[in-house]
Amino acid sequence: TLHLTEAPQYVLDVNPDTWTSARLAAENEKARIQREKKNFRPVTCEAALPTFRKGEYGMSVRLAAQGGRPASGTAKVRLPGHPDGRAQFAFKLKADETRDFSVTFGALDVSAFEEIPVEVEIAVGERTYVVKDEMNYLFAARMDTPTFDGKDNEWKGVRAWAIDATKSSDLGQFHEGAKDMRGDVRVGWNDDYLLFFVRTEDDVFLQQETGYKTWDWDCVQMGFTKVYRHRNTNNMWLDSLTRCRTELDFALTKNGPEMFRTMTWDPKGYPKTFIDPDKGKLGIVQRKDADGRTYTNYEIGIKWEVLGLAKVSPGERLGWAIALLDQDYLDRTVQIGPSKTGAFALKDPMKFGMLTLGEAE
């Protein structure tokens, strides 16, 4: 047996092929150790997450000391494309310590639905390296439970985020921008509910179904995951339970407002069916103006248990996406299905946005 040492090693009566294999193995081991030394990062960035406190945007950066040694240095945070999104801080970590550091950007001009690239540059001694990620600044406002009457008087202090009416993810050939369909959404939460107030403006409103297939006509769809962008492992069952991906539809039908689960991670425990009134609240108000345009308000309250959550707290992050579905023709030979515009990718949980539960102001 040969071991990697600084001193020569002498071996007698060894087959040349064995000697060659042993020499190559020793060389490979030496190269591996050199690579590890070269690539070793004394401090790692475990997370870079958005914050919004007292009207100011910022970020929480989690750093961890590696290798069983203390470490100190500086970290620079950048949001490329946003000149105001720059900050830096000094850090000092004990051996194996993990700690969160907060930076403030102040008045940052961003949309809640904008996926922003993030760069964290870490400098320790002569070592400097950059960690890259992306995030978005969508925060749910802490608020009391509203009356679910479809009116926005209880939402006056919550910002409405416009959904880009120029974009359509499905059947875009039938989507004609703002004149066809546009809308905005406000997001709130409390210990009992995840809350939404969605407003849509549509040139033609059509909803001919009830129950599962309301998604085939004009309605609002939302996708949720309990964990933001959970990456798959080799255990599909555990991945499904961890992610808890579900999809809910909100529609004004001939039977009145309906909330229906159309996708689930657990068909037995959370079946595809109507959400019970004690677990989901939906108030819808609709009016038409003189030229036939339809304005619809959806006031939504979803009990946390519907999403697979028992208890939540400020700073918790969910995966979320929204789509406004728009069908303009009864004749399906003219328009085969509804066009879809919204925020984030409803059918791909790895492209969901980050919805953060905000702190009380």
Image (cartoon, rainbow, N blue to C red):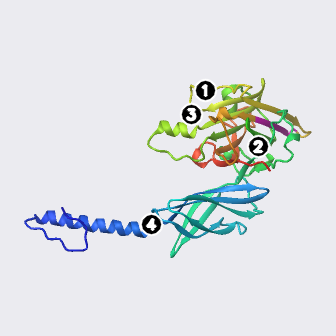
Question: Dot 4, how many residues are within 10 Å of its Cα: few (below 14), some (14-19), or many (20+)?
Answer: few
Label 2 neighbour load within 10 Å: few <14, some 14-19, many 20+: many
The residue that label 3 is drawn on is 265
Q: Amino acid at mark 1?
A: Pro
Which of the marked residues, 4 or 3, is nearer the chain's N terminus? Answer: 4
Q: Position of residue 323 (x, y in %)?
A: 70, 42
Q: Which residues are magenta?
A: 292-300
Q: Position of residue 221 (x, y in %)?
A: 69, 38
Viewer-nearest of labels 4 and 3? 4
Disc 4, disc 3: CB below 8 Å?
Answer: no
Q: Are marks 1 and 4 in contact (CB under 8 Å)?
A: no
Label 3, label 2: how far apart the Cα atoms are: 24 Å
Q: Which mark is residue 20?
A: none
Disc 3 marks which amino acid? Trp
Q: Give the camera-side residue of 75 and 139.
A: 75
Q: Nearer the viewer, residue 341 or 279?
A: 279
66 in the magenta segment: no
